[in-house]
Image (cartoon, helix red, strand yellow):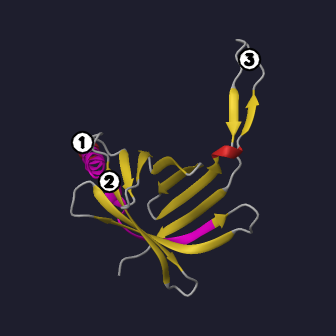
Amino acid sequence: MNRFIPVLVLFLNFTLSGQNFLDQHLGTYRGQLHLCYPNRPIDSVQFELIIQPTEKPGRWTNTVRYLSTDGGVGQVKDYDLVKDSVFNDDTHFILDEKDGILITETRIGNTFYSNYTVDGMFYTVATAYNGTYIDYELTCYPMEGKRESVSEPDEENVTWKVDSFPLMTVQKGRLYKQKTE
């Protein structure tokens, strides 16, 4: 019996690492997305994320649906999340917006990270998968409104130039996995 437990642990560890991360999180997730814009009160909207495999290995559909207060479906966005073929791992992905836009995503632990710019705005996105729920956060900064500063010289007489950017937008939400019917 004492030998069985380490073999079982090794087998389970190998099985989980052999599966793709996203295959462990298939299904429908629903929650509240809080929206913070400058000079406006914080607002929120219900939204859901549906993660499904496609017929192609290493590709999943991610459908985001924004829901009205009466439960009706408003705006729908369909994306594909694809394993990056440049890397042979479960860490590097590409978010295909299906309109010519491709965004690199990197998974560290249970969180996918991406950074990109659109028309002078810098975006950062973090999506953390936590078993029964997903945390999503998008922040946006205007690149032209930066504040420049310079440090005092350190012990090696080095100064550091630092640019900070005023926060423009935050979207933050938690989606809970829905039970299958």
Q: Nearer the viewer, mark 1 or mark 2?
A: 2
Q: Which mark is residue 82?
A: 2
Amino acid found under the numbered disc labelled 1: Arg
Residue displayed at 24% across by 42% down: 3
Q: Is residue 28 above or below residue 151?
A: below
The reply to whether dot 3 and dot 1 touch (C-beta < 8 Å) is: no
The picture places residue 151, in percent across and down from the top left corner, at 75, 25
Sequence-first disc among 1 and 2: 1
Amino acid found under the numbered disc labelled 2: Val
> Observer-nearest residue: 160 or 48?
160
| CA distance separating discs 3 and 2 | 45 Å
Q: As drawn, which residue projects farthest toward the front?
A: 119
The picture places residue 69, in percent across and down from the top left corner, at 58, 84
> Observer-nearest residue: 131 or 125?
125
Q: Residues within 10 Å of mark 2 (few under 14, many from 20)?
A: many
The picture places residue 155, in percent across and down from the top left corner, at 73, 13
Extent of the magenta region: 7-34
Q: Secondary structure at mark 1?
A: loop
Q: Secondary structure at mark 2?
A: strand
